[in-house]
Image (tube, rainbow, N blue to C red):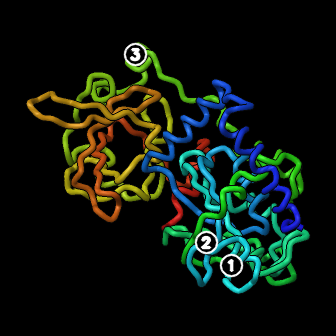
Amino acid sequence: MKNILIVLGIILGIAVFAAESGLFKKNTPNETNVKKEKQEIMDSKNVREIYFAGGCFWGTEHFFQQIRGVVGTEVGYANGKTQNPTYEEVVSHTTGFAETVKVKYDPEQVDLKLLIDLYFKTIDPTSLNQQGNDRGDQYRTGIYYTDKADEAVVKNEVQKLAKGYSKPVVVETIPLKNFYKAEDYHQDYLDKNPGGYCHIEPGLFEMAKKANPLPKASTYQKQDKKVLKQKLTAEQYNVTQENGTERPFQNEYWNETREGIYVDITTGEPLFVSTDKFESGCGWPSFSKPITKGLIDEKLDRTHGMTRVEVRSKTGDAHLGHVFNDGPEDKGGLRYCINSASLKFIPKAEMEIKGYGKYLPLLDKK
């Protein structure tokens, strides 16, 4: 069915080009801001990519474009045995390519597991070489990864899915061997052709828009210094509010080895987890990274005749410590040297009852 519509798509090409060139439409300020924000995210080091084959790539691309945290998509042909294939060559069933969507996403906004779970809702995972009315090996299903670290996540999610089916699940879970961008008229097809053919139920697009809503306003608030003066010990106040430093090897958490989460002593907001803690020999708690970069501020510190990078909690504006570039290379090369007095440790066994249950997956062994 899709082949028939290709002809119509080409006929409409001139009109589409004119529309995209701005002859008929100008971006609204909001659209421009969204595009600028997505480009800034794509230019950052945080963007990751994963590849989904889910039948006709027109609908699969449009589906992923609805999800908050997805910052870029591109349709193309993956894991075939030739170079630079054309659409006509792919549909000839001689090249071994699958219609695939490259999905670029910000892991701080959307989790890979959520992307995979949503993808499952768009396919019949037990159908081999067929989705909707489209038949052929180019319509097989698969999740292809470029980062070895994603392999376990992908395979585990498919294995969990398979438990709910009596028939075998035939979704491929293999590394990406190659990927070639499809012709321009395939890109953003359903944006160019609203109401065009799609094997995905239209209601799923609306579901995708709502699947990853913006987080609710933070429950963690900066405290008044008068309140903190009464709430904190003298050392905790000196460290967090007066940029003090506690003694090495004589603080509460420098040798803490239990599993758990470390929160801002002034607000209760989670900052670090035990799986990112390591023994650095410095005498203070050391972490390879915070839970997310958005939780902290880093500022140049030239006090005491040194040039360092200070670390502060973003919400509480509490002095935490400093970050150095002498951390373990296999963990990113950074060492967040943090004062125990700026933290409160919540053991794993108490996280659920104290309201930190949603962070328990962060303690899973990698």
Residue 156 shown left or right of residue 133 in the figure: left
Q: Residue at left 41%, top 13%? A: 226
Mark 1 — residue? 172
Asked if one can make out residue 8 in the rendered structure from this viewpoint, the answer is yes
Seen from the viewer's position, the closer of residues 139 and 235 is 139
- Looking at the rendering, which quadrant does residue 308 occupy? top left
Res 95 → quadrant: bottom right
Q: Residues within 10 Å of mark 1 (few under 14, many from 20)?
A: some
Q: Amino acid at mark 1?
A: Glu
2 or 3: tag closer to the N-terminus: 2
The mark lying in front, picked from 1 and 3, is 1
Q: Position of residue 269 (x, y in %)?
A: 50, 36
Residue at 61% across / 61% down in the picture?
Answer: 102
Q: Is residue 132 above or below residue 264?
A: below
Q: Nearer the viewer, residue 218 or 307?
A: 307
Q: Residue at x 68, y 69 (%)?
A: 157
Q: Amino acid at mark 3?
A: Lys
In the rendered view, tell whether residue 244 sits above or below residue 98: above
The reply, left or right, for residue 333 in relation to residue 176 is left
Residue 253 in the image, given as x and y percentages of width and height: 33, 48
Tag 1 near tag 2, CB within 8 Å: yes
Query: On the rendered structure, is 119 left or right of 237?
Result: right
Report which residue position mark 2 lands on: 144
Residue ID for mark 3? 225
Q: CA distance from mark 2 to mark 3?
A: 51 Å
